[in-house]
Image (spheres, helix red, strand yellow):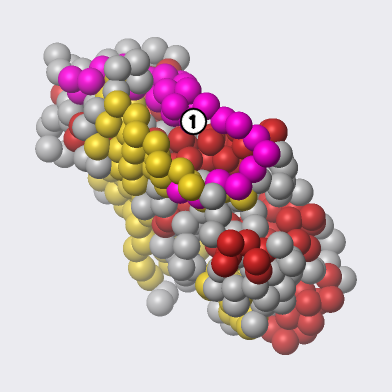
Amino acid sequence: MKHYYFTSESVTEGHPDKLCDLISDSILDEYLKQDENSRVAVETFASKNTITIAGQVTSKGEVNIEKVARNVMKEIGFDNEHTDIDYRTCQILINMTKQSPDIAMGVDTGGAGDQGIMFGYATDETKNYMPYALDLAHKLAKQLTKVRKTNEIPYLRPDGKVQVTVEYEEDVPKRIDTILVSTQHLEETSMEELKKAIIERVIFPIVPAEKIDENTKIYVNPTGRFVIGGPLGDTGLTGRKIIVDTYGGYARHGGGAFSGKDASKVDRSASYMLRHIAKNVVANGLAKKCELQVSYAIGKKEPISIWINTFHTNTIEEEKILEIMKEKFDLTPNGIIEYLDLKKPIYAKTTNYGHFGKEDMTWEKVIKLK
């Protein structure tokens, strides 16, 4: 398509799904701090004033799961059960078991912890090789949280969402067509004051001025009110924001979510590895866009298929890129874990504002390809 519009969204750390993701990833980190070989698969569910945490853990570590969950809610800013949830008084239910021996049997020998398909993607339309609409949405959502936590806009509450629509010409982002910000706020907040503050302190400091014109549409809280939020306004669940976590819908996503899973789960580790490879294909000038897929069988070490699509932007044959990829990178679960150093307690840092595009993560490192 020569001319088209594309929309991506991001959410703040106070969105109920992201609350659940962060609790799950924080529990994972606590286990990894004590035992780097911990096997963790944690799901969190939030509804009204109740947090339910369930899953499977096999570890030498001992973690106070309830304390971790309350600390996460406190850090986000959830302290009011009448508008969202209160970290001090909410009910926390925990139901944990050990990893199934049927799964452990395959993982213990270095095989994949499950069957599945995973994707990785990169594009040269931003400096961090992420799709432009998603990159901008993440920055706006992060700024929305920043102005709340620094009290720059004192009447904001934790829950919020951002949506950005970009107009493309010849696959190049030309302008911002629409920016939508929905943010939770105190009941007495003036909607006129809120819109003015969001535009001046969230949107203008982040969005490049040359990408906004007289036809750009800006919507702030289109319903006119957003007082009830967090788990009181909507249920939250680990792994429900997988498009926000990956490429904003601009590229495919595999069958599994990331948060709450240790690196033996290829849903997470292989997706990180494929992002690393795709990013380096683009960064090394082998293509302007690159999408990769691998698939695994439970208990098997090597992937059972590898696929590439460079959208006709490649500078060498795609088959040659695959040859370089197979020669350079070990795509077994243990090979990925070792290469990306995935036994460290790094996962709470990945939870919010996308798992990709953060330059301090190992899978974002740019290297030279042969």
Image side of residue 144 versus residue 220, left or right: right
Query: In the image shown, does 241 or 51 lie closer to the viewer?
Result: 51
* Neighbours of disc 1 within 10 Å: few (<14), some (14-19), many (20+): many
Q: Amino acid at mark 1?
A: Ile
Percent position (x, y) of residue 314? 67, 78
Whether residue 8 is in magenta: the answer is no
Q: Residue furthest front?
A: 101
Q: Residue at x 65, y 35 (%)?
A: 61
Is residue 165 in view from this perspective?
Answer: yes
Q: What residue would you read off at disc 1?
A: 65
Q: Is residue 65 above or below residue 80?
A: below
For the C terminus, the quadrant is bottom right
Quadrant showing the N terminus: bottom left
Q: Residue at x 39, y 14 (%)?
A: 152
Q: Is residue 322 above or below residue 61?
A: below
Which of the 4 image quadrants contains residue 16?
Answer: top left
The percent position of residue 147, horizontal first and vertical second, equals 41, 21
Instruction: Give SS at disc 1.
Output: helix
Question: Which residue is nearer to you in this view: 368 or 228?
Answer: 228
The residue furthest right is 370
> Residue 330, percent across and down?
79, 69
What residue do we see at 73% from left, 56% from top?
A: 337
The magenta-colored residue range is 55-83
267 over 299 or under it: above or below: above
